[in-house]
Amino acid sequence: MIVGAGAAGLMTAIWAARGLVGSDAKIVLLDGAKTVGVKILVAGGGRCNVTHHEVDERQYAGGSRNTVRNVLRRFDVPRTVAFFAALGVELKREQTGKLFPVTDSARTVLDALLGEITRLGVTLRYPWRVGAVERTPGGGFVVRRQESDQAIECRHLVLATGGMALPKSGSDGGGYTLATALGHTLTEHMYPALVPLVVADASRWLADLSGISAHVRVDVCSGAGKRLATFENDLLCTHFGLSGPAVMDASRWLSEARTHDPDATLRICWLPGETFEGVDGALTRFGARPLLAWLRERLPERLARALCQTLDIDPAQPGSRLKKEPRRALAHTLVGMPVHIAHDRGFTHAEATAGGVPLNEIDPRTMRSRACEGLWLVGEILDVDGRIGGFNFQWAWSSGYTAGTALAAASASPQASA
């Protein structure tokens, strides 16, 4: 029995079924949502960023990177590409390194996965929301439907329920209740990852630039100024604050830092690769040229004007008239501007969950639970969250493959499942 028909659950079902072809074992896949695979359908703006060209454990946060590495190696990017190709889904690599289906349609990906579980004889039931799970005296499980007297017994149980991100997809945290009822613990903190940020009033002027984008470096810094994490990518100003890959990658690190350091801050380098000394020197050398002419060669004009306005600098003045203190203030702003963040947009707008079941509670060779015999955990329910760009899907494919193949071996062998 696999609870959750998202990316990790579907992958687990496929590889378990492939390993059990010709056996009497039955695989049932349950999902509580009215539409299966919502996260797949909405990912990548409806195109589904299946994976990334280059994936390793350094692109993930949460639990042990050594464990993440071991799981990723069991089913890496080349195997992922080959797997989807065999299902009729050809992937293309974009300049960012992201891999999308050549159809540019997430439906292509989901239909291929659903078609494969149908071909393999997996039973899919939805909407069938699990309300409780209990152990049986014989060592199996009774899975009970929420607000119903329906129940199904199984020998092996897989939790692929996701975390709390995008709750309308069905991943509303219910899987954590099932996991803890079966003996697992959860990390002390769980918070949205890959989530846009809402600016406080002091930085509200950024929201007034809604629609402006720029290539930046975003730093998460401690209250003492130590850089905790850094990401270089695109930033997007929105009506509520900040979004875009650089900000969304940084979001979980800011949330984590603020749990023990309320003064942790977000800083934006509008000119990535530049230093204060380099920018300050450049500002002293452009003579009679208007300051705005120099800035708009590097930044969108609306952004350049707004930065000057926050510092009470006239952007039309010749560079030679810019005095030392305003010049240095502008240089500091361009390479490390602090942004006042009120809060993030919450799990409703997040793409992943930071936190979950600790990785030391599963065997990374099989994804088997160390706390409960016959239980397996895959995907986002675990304390693993990757950067934006297909990394979380790769974790789903890798952990699902690892669990599915091991589950097939355990189900096929009475001795192995004992």
Image (cartoon, helix red, strand yellow):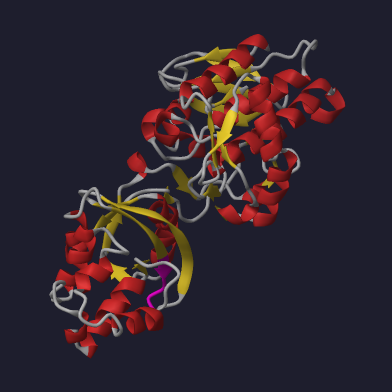
Q: Nearer the viewer, residue 388 or 297?
A: 297
196 part of magenta stretch:
no
Choose top left, top right, bottom left or bottom right for residue 366.
top right
Position above or below: 81 against 327? above
Point out the residue furthest to the bottom here. Answer: 324
- The image shows residue 236 at horizontal and vertical percentages of 31, 51
Left or right: 401 with respect to 249?
right
- The image shows residue 349 at horizontal and vertical percentages of 34, 41
Task: Identify which residue is drawn at 56% across, 22% down.
Answer: 143
Tell me how many marks there are. 0
Left or right: 337 with respect to 78?
left
The reply to whether residue 13 is visible in this rendering is yes
Q: Which of 332 and 7 is in front in this view?
A: 332
- The image shows residue 397 at horizontal and vertical percentages of 62, 34
Point out the residue furthest to the front here. Answer: 288
Range drawn in magenta? 219-223
Magenta residues, dominant SS class: strand
221 part of magenta stretch:
yes
Task: Identify which residue is drawn at 80% across, 10% down.
Answer: 22
Position above or below: 391 against 146? below
- The image shows residue 203 at horizontal and vertical percentages of 21, 64
The reply to whether residue 62 is visible in this rendering is no
Quarter of the figure with the C terminus: top right
Quarter of the figure with the N terminus: top right
Point out the residue furthest to the right here. Answer: 415
Position above or below: 31 against 397? above
Choose top left, top right, bottom left or bottom right for residue 412.
top right
